Amino acid sequence: MVQALSQQGYRVTGPRRALVRLIADRKVRFTAADLEEDVASATPAVGRATVFRTLELLLSLGLVERVHTEGERRDAYVVAEGLHHHHLVCSQCGVVTEVMGCMVDDLVSSLAQAADFQVEGHWMEIVGLCSRCREAGSLE
């Protein structure tokens, strides 16, 4: 991410570097509030505005993606993999599994044709329980 920012002509400041490091290490979805909390303990000088501006910049460059947060009124994010994919989102633990490839292209094309609609892109998120959370639930 740092290299991509630099290659695109963006300054890689200390706060940006700290945020990128925190983001790159995440394996589950996260919110701006999660990031603020983590950066406050690691680098207290990073302000809330820097967190939001950095997230928006990373979104615009395709380095992070927004994901669904069921029942919450704030965006969540995951590190982008770069290739077209869809997400399986565990509603309990927040782990996001990326499913590479696309099995819905034909459906999307059919829907677009029926509605005389020009598709520019699509994404799909399937919300449910991962195997670990299902197993933990069956043990209770």
Image (cartoon, rainbow, N blue to C red):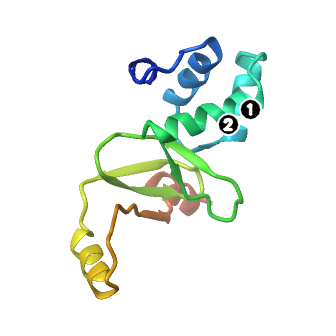
The residue lying toward the viewer, choosing from 130 and 97, is 97
Query: Quadrant of the rendered structure where residue 11 is?
Result: top right
Q: Which mark is residue 63?
A: none
User: Does 40 sit left or right of 65 as displayed?
Assistant: right
Mark 1 is on which residue type?
Ala
Q: For mark 2, give the secondary structure.
A: helix
The residue lying toward the viewer, choosing from 2 and 85, is 2
User: Does 121 sit left or right of 33 as displayed?
Assistant: left
Relative image position of residue 43 (x, y in whole percent):
72, 15
- Residue at (31% x, 81% y) in the render: 111
- Residue at (55% x, 30% y) in the render: 23
The residue lying toward the viewer, choosing from 101 and 49, is 49
- Residue at (21% x, 74% y) in the render: 106
Mark 2 is on which residue type?
Phe
Circle 2 crowding by C-alpha within 10 Å: few under 14, some 14–19, many from 20: some
Residue beneath disc 2: 52
Seen in the picture, residue 81 relative to 98 is either above or below; the reply is: above
Mark 1–mark 2 CB contact (< 8 Å): yes
Separation of disc 1 and disc 2 at Cα? 5 Å
Q: For mark 1, give the secondary structure.
A: helix
Circle 1 crowding by C-alpha within 10 Å: few under 14, some 14–19, many from 20: few
Residue beneath disc 1: 49
